[in-house]
Amino acid sequence: MMVCCFIASGFRVENLNNCASGIPLMIANKPRAVEKCGVKQRSKNIPFFDNESKKSLREALQYIQKDSEQNAEKVKSKILTSIKELLTNPKRYNTDKYKLNNDGSYRAYEIYKYRITYHVSDDEIRIIRIRHTKMNPLEY
């Protein structure tokens, strides 16, 4: 089975609809390079997006896009760049104060009034949630 892949903004996107790296096609438009690969695999250098975080980011960008396509692109770029920067220093942000019994591996930060919550483990960075700060915080 051949899986089409492409690289966009430094993120590997596989399967073009729901990739193993977690970046949906809508976010990863404008590929920089195109390649074919026979095995679905996710690089350890790519943050993994949970389904909830993908969905909420997609919805947020669609909402912003109704008023301004330029602002949606700006927010998308800033959020994805900040997530990519986690690879160099995953513990750069404070621990998540809304996580119950947080051992320090759950962290969060805000960009453009969006709160990005992520989990750091030895082998991956997992994006747990992306939500607008006006929404009620959920303890988890």
Image (spheres, helix red, strand yellow):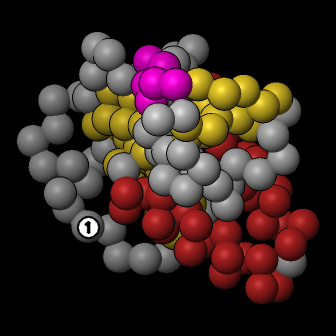
Magenta stretch holds residue 40: yes
Magenta residue span: 38-44
- Residue 110 image position (x, y, % from top left): 55, 51
- Residue 49 image position (x, y, % from top left): 43, 45
Q: Residue furthest bottom?
A: 66
Residue at x 72%, y 76% (from the top left corner): 64
Q: How many marks?
A: 1
Left or right: 128 in relation to 37:
left
Residue at x 26%, y 67% (from the top left corner): 138
Foreground: 62 or 17?
Answer: 17
Magenta stretch holds residue 136: no
User: Which residue has dot 1 on it?
Assistant: 138
- Residue 126 image position (x, y, % from top left): 37, 36
Foreground: 15 or 123?
Answer: 15
Q: Residue furthest front?
A: 1
Left or right: 83 in relation to 95:
right
Q: Quadrant of residue 20?
A: top left
Residue at x 35%, y 76% (from the top left corner): 136
Disc 1 residue type? Leu
